Image: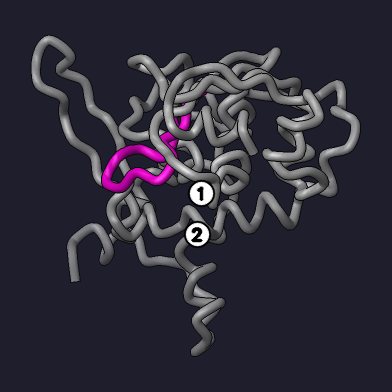
Amino acid sequence: MSRLRRMSPRRSYDQYCSTARALDVVGDRWTLLIVRELLAGPRRYTDLHADLPGVSTDVLASRLKDMEREGLTTRRRLPPPGAVYVYELTARGRQLLPVLQALWEWGAPELTERRATDAVRAHWFALPLLRGLEGVSGGGLVEVRLEEGEFHLYVGAEDVPVYGAGPAPEEPDARLSMDTGTCAAVGRGDVSVLDAVRGGRIEVTGEGTLAKALREA
């Protein structure tokens, strides 16, 4: 048993049940939202805090320590000239991707009108859209443009971040432009990506295999 575990014992439901054991690890407030952010790849503490509006610095620091202890994340120092610490998911942490996608699907009916107090980041729509693109011929780097901003997805790729905030770091295989309502509808399952393209709700540009498959479907 590590010294850290002895100093900070994990709270437990004390039930011999895999659901209870899973909630022992990820059931605390903010934990799964931190995973959502880290699916974009290594992030600095300040970046995490900026994209988790409402979390206090103390709670965020505590959750990150808990997640490292449980083997969900690691912390490492970037080489110069960066020389800052970043947090990233372990292989076990990345296995939570389908869990978060299922939670989005389950909670999507709650996304009706946006409340005045609701924060929003464009990249929060990345995971449901990634699921919506599964099964479309081709794959690769996809840039998505919403009125709130841009993000990019890695469709069908392995051993890379699932998505990233901001424009694609290189020429994407496809660019998708849509409004937030359409992106939310895709996430809810109200409309498929292909039907949204056919109906003119998603504009597709680019010359990659995926872009051509979407336009020709």
Q: Give the Cα distance between marks 2 and 1.
A: 6 Å
Q: Which residue is mark 1?
A: 31
Q: Which residue is mark 2?
A: 26
Along the viewing direction, whichever of 188 and 6 lies nearer the viewer: 188
Quarter assignment of residue 1? bottom left
Quadrant placement of the C terminus:
top right
Position of residue 143 measured from the top left corner of the image (x, y, whole percent): 50, 22
Q: Is residue 59 above or below residue 204?
A: below
**Does the magenta portion include 162?**
yes
Rendered residue at 18%/14% (across/down): 82
First of labels 2, 1 by sequence position: 2
Position of residue 138 measured from the top left corner of the image (x, y, whole percent): 44, 41
The magenta-colored residue range is 151-163
How many numbered discs sit on the rendered protein?
A: 2
Position of residue 216 measured from the top left corner of the image (x, y, whole percent): 61, 33
Q: Amino acid at mark 1?
A: Thr
Alpha-carbon neighbours of circle 2 within 10 Å: few (<14), some, or many (≥20)? many
Q: Is residue 107 left or right of residue 57?
A: right
Q: Are marks 2 and 1 in contact (CB under 8 Å)?
A: yes
Position of residue 77 measured from the top left corner of the image (x, y, whole percent): 16, 29
